[in-house]
Amino acid sequence: MKFKSILIFLGMAIVAVVFVLRGIPYFVNLYLNSHADEIVGDLITRTNDFSGHKVQFGKVKLDYDYRGTYLELDSVAIFPDEDFPESRVKIQLLADRILLSGFRWRALLLNNTIILDSAELSKVKIESLSPSLDSLNLRKKAKTQRKKGKDYQAIKISNVHLSDFSIVNKDVDSDSTRFEIEGLTVTAQKFTLTSKDLEEANALFDVEGIEGKIAHSSIHFNEYRNELNAENLVFSKEKRSLSIENVNLDNKLSKYEYIQGFTKETDWVEIEQASLELNNMNYDAFFREGIIESEKLLAKDSKIVVFRDKRMPDNTLQRPKMIHKIIGGIPKPIHVDMVRLENGYVKYIERPDNESPIAGEIFFNQINAEIINITNIPDMLDMHNEMTLKANAKIMDKGLVDLNVVYYLQDSTGGFAMEGNVQDLEVAAINTMLRPATQVEVRTGKIDDLAFNIKGDDIEGSGELVMKYHDLAIDIRGKSFGKPQNIFQKIGSFLTNKLVIPSDNPNKKGELKKGDVYFKRDQSKFIFNYWWKLVLSGMRSTLTGEDEEKMREKSSQKE
C-alpha cells in the first residue's frame, strides 16, 4: 500500500512537471496566438512615436517558453489613423519580415522594458511626414506632452541584424523630401536605448559593437534647392572607421536660375565628387554625447565649383564669421586631430559687373593640404589652441602655390599668421579671370617667385610681399571683346607698360622692389576674399610703389 502511494505521488509529480514544462507554455501560446494581433499591435502603438497609428499583419506567430518568447511577423504595416493631427509626425512602415527571439515578459510587465536575445528585420521601409522641424524642436523644448503614448524605460537587444532598410522623411505641407536613407544594413551587439536617451539632445544609444553599410543617403536643404548625397557609406565600431565612397552636393537649379532666386549676391556651389574616410573614430563619444572625435579625416579627389554673379546687389548686411567663430559655432562638439585633402580641385566662376559677355574663371588643381587641430571642445582648446593649415596646389595647372596659415582659436579678435609663395606662373594663364573682370589682359610675363608674410585679425591685416617677375606686359582691351585693339587702346597699353608697370623685378640693375601689405577687412565678405585682398594689396604695392601708410590713408578716406 505504501509503495502504491509512492507511485501515485511520483505520477502526480511527473504530471505536474509535464504540465509546468509543457502545459503552461501550451496554454500561454494558445492565448498569445489567439490575441497576437492585439498584443503585438499594442506593444507598438503604446509608444509616443507610434501612438495614434494602426498596425496590420499578414501573419503573426508567437512561441512562448520559459526562456522567452519567439515572435515572427510577416507583411507588417503601420500607418496613422484617419483623424491623426497634422501637427504631429506621421509614420508609415512596411516590413517584409521581423523575427524576434527571447522576449522577456517579466521585464515588460514589471519594468516596462523590452529585452530580447536577438532581433532580425529585413526589407523595412519607413516614411515619415512631419511639419516644420523648427516647430517640432520648439515644442520639444517647451516639453509639450502628447495625450497618448508611453515610451519604454529601455529597449535592450543582445544581437541585432537589419537588412535592406530604407527611411524617408518628407515635409507634410510640400511633400518634399528632407532626408532619405536607402540600403541600410546593420549588425550590432548589446544594443540599449533608454528613455533618458530619448530625452537627452546629444545621446543616441549604447552599443558594444556595430558595423554596417548605407548604399545611399541624402539631405535636402536651402528650401530644397540643394541636395547632399553620400554613396556607399561603411562604418565599423570595432575598426573605429567610417568611409564614404562618393559625396556630392547637387544644386537642383542651373547657375543663373538659382542666383535669380535671391535678391542679393549669393554663391552657387556644387561638389561634383569626393571620397571621405574617418580613422580612429570614437564611436562611444558620438553615441553617448554627440561628440565627433577622430584622429584623421581624409578627403580624396574632391571637385568643387563655385559661381557668383557680381551683377546682383552686394549683400552688405551679411556678416560671415572668421575661422575661429565658424569652428566654435559648429552645433556639435568636434575634435579632429588632422584633416588631409588629397588631389583636390576648386574652380571659381564669376560674372563681372560690366558689359563682358562672358564669365571669368580660375581654378586650382592638384590641391594637397593638411589642417591640424580642428576643435571647439574647451578642454582641448586649453591644451592646444592653434589650428594650422599647410597646403600646396597648382594655379590653372601651371604655377605652384604653397600656403601656411596659423589660426589662434581662442583669440577673440580672430588673429592669424599667413605665409606662402607662388612660383613659375605664366601670368597670361589668369587671363580667363582677368579679362572679363578688368578689361585688361596680360600679354607676356612670368612670376618667378612671389613670397608673402602677413599677420591679421578680424579687422585688418598687414605684412610684406616680394614678387620676382620678368617680361611683364599688359594690353588694355576695354569693352571690345573679340575685337583687335584700337589705336587708343594700343597707346594706353604702351604708356602703361613703359611708365606705370615695371616690366621686371628685380630690374635690369638688379634692384628688387618689395611690396607692403595692408587691407582693412570688408565685414560682409568671407575669409577667402579677405586673404586674397591682402595678397593683392602687396602685388599692387610692388607694381605702383604704394606703401602701407598710403594704403591706410586711402582706407580711412573710404570710410
Image (cartoon, rainbow, N blue to C red):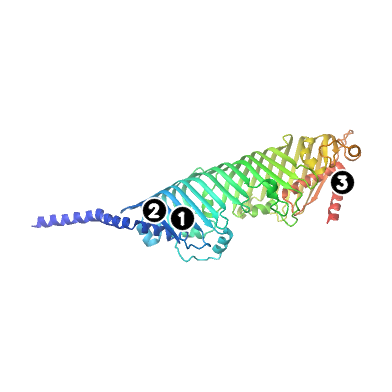
Is any atom of residue 240 visible in this view?
no
How far is mark 2 from mark 1, CA to CA? 25 Å
- In the rendered image, residue 450, in percent from the top left (x then y), is placed at 79, 38
Q: Can you identify the residue that label 1 sits on?
A: 193
**Tag nearer the camera, 2 or 3:** 2
The three-letter amino acid code for the residue at tag 3 is: Glu
- In the rendered image, residue 466, in percent from the top left (x then y), is placed at 81, 40
Few, some or many residues within 10 Å of mark 1 (<14, 14–19, 20+):
some
**Tag nearer the camera, 2 or 1:** 2
Picture layout, residue 490 above or below residue 409:
above
Of residues 492 and 541, the one nearer the viewer is 492
How far is mark 3 from mark 1, CA to CA? 66 Å
Labelled disc at residue 291: none
How far is mark 2 from mark 3, CA to CA? 81 Å
Residue drawn at x 80%, y 50% is 519
Picture layout, residue 538 above or below residue 11:
above
Residue drawn at x 80%, y 42% is 465
* Image quarter (top left, top right, bottom left or bottom right) of the N terminus: bottom left
- In the rendered image, residue 72, in percent from the top left (x then y), is placed at 36, 50
Is any atom of residue 532 visible in this view?
yes
Q: Can you identify the residue that label 2 sits on?
A: 57
The image quadrant of residue 133 is bottom right
Few, some or many residues within 10 Å of mark 2 (<14, 14–19, 20+):
some
Return the residue found at the far left: 1
Q: Can you identify the residue that label 3 sits on?
A: 546
Of residues 381 and 114, the one nearer the viewer is 114
The three-letter amino acid code for the residue at tag 1 is: Leu
Q: Earlier in the sequence, mark 3 or mark 1?
A: 1
Few, some or many residues within 10 Å of mark 3 (<14, 14–19, 20+):
some
